[in-house]
Image (cartoon, helix red, strand yellow):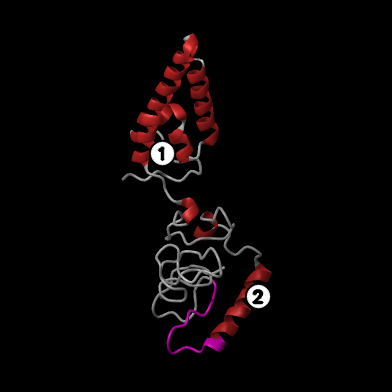
């Protein structure tokens, strides 16, 4: 586990060469500790949070690393979870279970991109009867229910009940589209806030 030294975002994979949040190459930057993601200042030789050597000029990296290893052993012996109750503990990465810098963008991962409120609302207004807006936001069960009811309504439209069913599902989808556009629906199925664009 390592962090971007420029923005403090956690690298999701050790093979990543660039930060997924700011695009800075791995190892470049001087704002955050690459070991724990804590904020550092230009005059620091070691991170004040974890003791890791941060590579400042005029310091002895071997001595600094030895101090880090000693401090880390002491900390692990004294407290098995030194981050408990800190800002890092309160901002745990939902996917990997690792702490993430609270100043970084938690939705920068490609799997956690914020969905557009306008797109979801318009899909609900124009194609709500087929559940397209709910598929887009990740509410799959509701979307499948709307799609199935619309298909059943179309197939039974000649009876008369089907037309009523299609109309009802269409009004349901339209109402959800309006709710999305007016801010009544604020997040997608993962709890990520919708972006206004």
Taking depth in this image into account, of 153 and 29 the one nearest to the observer is 153
**Residue drawn where x is 31% and y is 45% of the image:** 197
Residue 114 place in picture, x, y as percent:
42, 48
Decide if residue 15 is on the left or right side of residue 103.
right
Query: Start and end of the magenta stretch?
Result: 50-63
The residue that label 2 is drawn on is 73
Q: Is residue 183 visible?
A: no
Q: Main secondary structure of the magenta part?
A: loop
Q: Secondary structure at mark 1?
A: loop
User: Where residue 80 sits in the image (x, y, percent)?
Assistant: 66, 64
Is tag 2's residue or tag 1's residue first in the polypeptide sequence?
A: 2
Q: Is residue 131 above or below residue 114?
A: above
Q: Nearer the viewer, residue 133 or 161?
A: 161
Q: Residue at x 53, y 31 (%)?
A: 144
Please identify the quarter of the rendering in which residue 13 is found: bottom right
Residue 110, given in percent of the width and then of the height, sits at 47, 55
Q: Residue at x 40, y 80 (%)?
A: 43
Answer few, some or many: residues within 10 Å of disc 1's Cα (few below 14, many 20 plus, some between 14 and 19): some
Secondary structure type for disc 2: helix
Task: Determine which of the numbered discs, if any, sits on residue 186 in the image.
Answer: 1
Task: Kindly identify which numbered label has been placed on residue 177.
Answer: none
Q: How many marks?
A: 2
């Amino acid at each position: 586990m390592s962090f971007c030294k420029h923005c403090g975002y956690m690298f999701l994979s050790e093979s990543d060469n660039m930060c997924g949040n700011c695009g800075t190459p791995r190892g470049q930057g001087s704002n955050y500790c690459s070991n724990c993601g804590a904020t550092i200042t230009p005059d620091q030789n070691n991170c004040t949070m974890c003791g890791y050597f941060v590579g400042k000029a005029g310091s002895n990296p071997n001595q600094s690393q030895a101090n880090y290893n000693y401090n880390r052993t002491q900390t692990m012996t004294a407290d098995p979870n030194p981050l408990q109750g800190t800002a890092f503990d309160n901002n745990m990465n939902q996917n990997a279970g690792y702490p993430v810098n609270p100043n970084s963008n938690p939705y920068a991962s490609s799997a956690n991109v914020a969905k557009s409120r306008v797109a979801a609302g318009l899909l609900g207004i124009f194609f709500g009867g087929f559940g397209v807006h709910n598929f887009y936001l990740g509410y799959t069960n509701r979307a499948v229910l709307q799609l199935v009811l619309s298909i059943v309504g179309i197939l039974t439209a000649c009876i008369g009940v089907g037309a009523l069913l299609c109309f009802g599902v269409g009004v349901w989808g339209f109402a959800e589209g309006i709710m999305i556009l007016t801010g009544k629906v604020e997040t997608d199925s993962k709890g990520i806030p919708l972006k206004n664009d």
